[in-house]
Image (cartoon, rainbow, N blue to C red):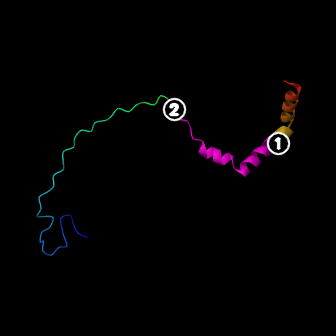
Amino acid sequence: MYLRGESSDPTRMSNWMEELPVEPEPDEPKIQQSSKKQTKEPKPDGALLDGLLATDKVKDLLRQIVLETLKSPEGRELIQKIAAGG
């Protein structure tokens, strides 16, 4: 491992202490470009939720929940209302 300015070249007998210090370049003020504001909100991707809902386990679970709900007294009332046209 060599420090900055050191070399493994035996013919060059200098090191980093003999070199002039490097002065940092003055920082120029950065020009900020005005960004355009988005007028529309980006649409959510939903890929994670779509992937989750597409699994067979989730489909089976939702099917069981719906069937249990329809078998309940509230579900029966709902079916009767729909069948009666109201």
Query: Quadrant of the image for the C terminus?
Result: top right
Q: Which of 7 and 16 lies nearest the eye of the viewer?
A: 7
How packed mark 1 is, by other alpha carbons closer than 10 Å (few <14, some 14-19, many 20 or more), is few
Residue at image mark 1: 67
Task: State how many labels appear.
Answer: 2
Relative to 21, does residue 63 appear above or below in the rendering? above
Q: Amino acid at mark 2?
A: Glu
The kind of secondary structure element at disc 1 is: helix
Relative to 18, does residue 32 appear above or below in the rendering? above
- Residue 52 appears left or right of 76: left
Relative to 32, does residue 47 appear above or below in the rendering? below
Which residues, given as a range, are shown in magenta? 40-68
Name which quarter of the figure residue 76 lies in: top right
Q: Is residue 60 magenta?
A: yes
The kind of secondary structure element at disc 2 is: loop
Q: Amino acid at mark 1?
A: Leu
**Percent x, y of residue 31:** 28, 36
Q: Nearer the viewer, mark 2 or mark 1?
A: 2
How packed mark 2 is, by other alpha carbons closer than 10 Å (few <14, some 14-19, many 20 or more), is few
Residue in the image at 14% along x and 57% along y = 21
- Residue 51 appears left or right of 59: left
- Residue 54 appears left or right of 68: left
- Residue 52 appears left or right of 13: right
**Percent x, y of residue 35:** 38, 33
Residue in the image at 15% along x and 64% along y = 16
Q: Which mark is residue 41?
A: 2
**Percent x, y of residue 12:** 12, 71
Q: CA separation, marks 2 and 1?
A: 38 Å
Residue in the image at 73% along x and 51% along y = 57
Comes first in the chain, label 2 or label 1: 2
Q: Which of 28 and 68 lies nearest the eye of the viewer?
A: 28
